Amino acid sequence: MVKDLTKANFEQEVMTSTVPVVVDFWASWCGPCRMVSPIIDSLAEEYGDKIKVCKVNVDAEGALASEFAVVSIPTVLVIKDGKIVERSVGAKSFDDFCDIIDSHL
């Protein structure tokens, strides 16, 4: 299941997570974001409880986007033990995202 993140639940959902967290920063008007969205959903199904998959709408949560220096979208972060271990900018394939995630499991 993909969880929507806000400033209010970010700390609890991401920074204290016991599994790696994939965070997709996106916007509804962004074409590449719309391409990546179903891939992100598929990752949540593929990996199940091994990872947590979350999305941040940059229009609604601009402060979070700024906090993580997100200047281009889609930006996908992998956060493990409260630290960013991977940053991917731009649309990628399902297999590319799997490779990124697998390297942090």
Image (cartoon, rainbow, N blue to C red):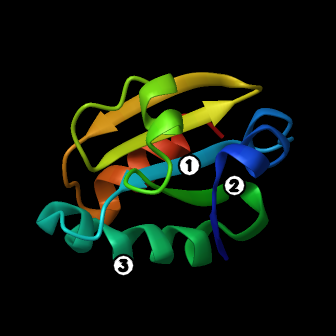
| Kind of residue sitting beneath label 3 | Pro
Q: CA distance from mark 2 to mark 1?
A: 7 Å
Which residue, given by chain and number where applicable, does mark 1 sit on?
A: 22
In this rendering, is residue 28 above or below 93?
below
| Kind of residue sitting beneath label 2 | Ile
Q: Earlier in the sequence, mark 3 or mark 2?
A: 3
Q: Answer yes or no: do the residues labelled 1 and 3 have beta carbons within 8 Å? A: no
Which residue, given by chain and number where applicable, does mark 2 sit on?
A: 51
| Kind of residue sitting beneath label 1 | Val
Q: Nearer the viewer, residue 26 or 22?
A: 26
Kindly identify the residue that appears in the image at 63 percent across and 56 percent down.
5
Q: Nearer the viewer, residue 86 or 102?
A: 86
Drawn side of residue 56 relative to residue 71, left or right? right
Q: Answer yes or no: do the residues labelled 2 and 1 have beta carbons within 8 Å? A: yes
Quarter holding the C terminus is top right
Q: Earlier in the sequence, mark 1 or mark 3?
A: 1
Kindly identify the residue that appears in the image at 51 percent across and 45 percent down.
101
Q: CA distance from mark 3 to mark 2?
A: 17 Å
Which residue, given by chain and number where applicable, does mark 3 sit on?
A: 38
Q: Earlier in the sequence, mark 2 or mark 1?
A: 1
Q: Nearer the viewer, mark 2 or mark 1?
A: 1
Drawn side of residue 35 relative to residue 61, left or right? left
Query: Mark 3: which secondary structure?
Result: helix
